[in-house]
Amino acid sequence: MKMRERTTPGRLPIFICLAVLVSAVASLAQSGSGKSSSVGQVLFVLASSIEAPVMDSAPVSTVLYSVSPTKNLVSGVVVLQGSSFAGAQNWTPNGVRSINEVGRYLIVEYPYDVPCCVIFIPEDAPAAFEPVRVVPDGMSGLNCGLSSVRGGESEACSLWELIPFISPELLAQGKIGSTTLNSVCKRQGQAPSVVTDRWADYKTIIFEGVTPRGAPQCYLSSENGVIEKYLIGRPAITITAMPTDIPPSTTRRGLTLDAANDRFRVVSIHGNKDLVDHNTDVFVQTVADGRWKRLPALPVRLIGTYPTNMDRMEYRLFDNWLVTSASAALLRANDITEVVVPDVLTVVETGKQWDDLGVEVEPRTAPDVATLPARRITLWNLADGRRIDLAIPQNDSEVVHVFDGHQVLLRIHDKLFFAEIQGSKLADYKLTAFDSAIPQVHWAFYSPR
């Protein structure tokens, strides 16, 4: 079986295509995979690296594709060109810091090393992406993908904490400056704008949950029974109350924000003398009533026990559906033995043509599940409690998106499949695309014709 090969982008410096590529949109093929609100729309996918850039690594560009009726990715539009560095003397900031879906936009923050800039990709006109430089000279920018939406989905904002560069002499005197907040916002039909120090945006945080592996995760803190956003040189911003079954503490305690939208907040409580290690205490809050409940996520411990610093418990949030993902190596490193029996998914040939591929589903029984060499993916419905457990022998697999609460786009290495959520199972798997560029695909959306 031979798939169409794509060439690797050249070793070029980071830059943004500033022109509005209207001609590229006109050439994008129509997808035949849509259902529900996707009827009559084009499926787009965004390919980009989610690995931390390393010395002498091949550059990976951020590229926008549409999915053709022939199950290929077509009309690639480069949103952010890849770059590489060969050492301290030739160092160039490179890589993507985060990509998150916010309202009707994908927001790309870059570069990984010293983030300064953001790109808004409008889902209703994907090739009309717009770059904005956020961090001025003399400042450094801090962000891991925190965003907000104001006025429904009409305004999508990327939140940037800016800190002034401080000389070593001032640092020695304990002078560190104070945080400024830049909310970089985009409305349809308007140029991006910047609003300064709109601190209330932290109370409506949007964070889909995916960041480049190895990137700093989104940290919050707690003190005196409240969760807050700690700011250098400024009072902390109170976001919400702590879960009631966590012992109150007057000492600042760390939390990881795993995901958040306008319906739910997902946090992991860091370990201390009252709690066990990070990720064994994962809580979900319903934003509407402020109530918390414990999520029985896999008990993955602190980063010191990870097989590699890039192999961590992963979270993504799509409306009511939270997706968690852990590799087989991560489970072994944490001695995970008590697990729910998953459906094991295997790609199989169903005919004589190259695209005659399907997914075979085999429910497993204990006790062999604990030693199954597979990535474990769980879909949790935070609204009604449903749980769907999957085991995929190909570790390079993920849920790319959940559309309309029932249509799952699943990536298994270089193939994309759609599946339907039926109760607490996935069913009706259909091959959507098979292409050599798909291993870098981690985001998807529908756009009007």
Image: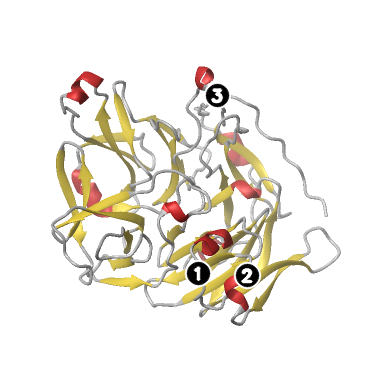
Q: Amino acid at mark 1?
A: Ile
Label 3 close to label 2 by CB (< 8 Å)? no
Rendered position, 177 above or below 323: above
**Between residues 93 and 119, which one lies in front from this camera angle?**
93
- The earlier-in-sequence mark between 3 and 2 is 3
Give the quadrant of residue 194. top left
Quadrant assignment, res 227: bottom left
- Residue in the picture at 52% in, 49% down: 308
Residue located beneath label 2 in the image: 372
Percent across and percent down for residue 63 are 58, 39
- Which mark is nearer the camera, 3 or 2? 2
Q: Mark 1 and 3 residues: CB-CB less than 8 Å, in contact?
A: no
Q: Residue at x 48, y 69 (%)?
A: 379
- Amino acid type at mark 3: Pro
Q: In the structure shown, which secondary structural element does the residue marked by tag 1 occupy?
A: loop
Q: Position of residue 221 (x, y in %)?
A: 24, 52
Tell me the SS state at disc 3. Answer: loop
Where does label 1 land, which residue?
A: 336
Q: Position of residue 400 (x, y in %)?
A: 54, 57
The amino acid at mark 2 is: Leu
Q: Is residue 186 visible?
A: yes
- Residue closest to the eye, 417 or 281: 281
Identity of the residue furthest to the top in this view: 89
Q: Residues within 10 Å of mark 3 (few under 14, many from 20)?
A: some
**In whole angstroms, how far apart are the C-alphas of marks 1 and 3?**
43 Å
State the mark number for residue 13. 3
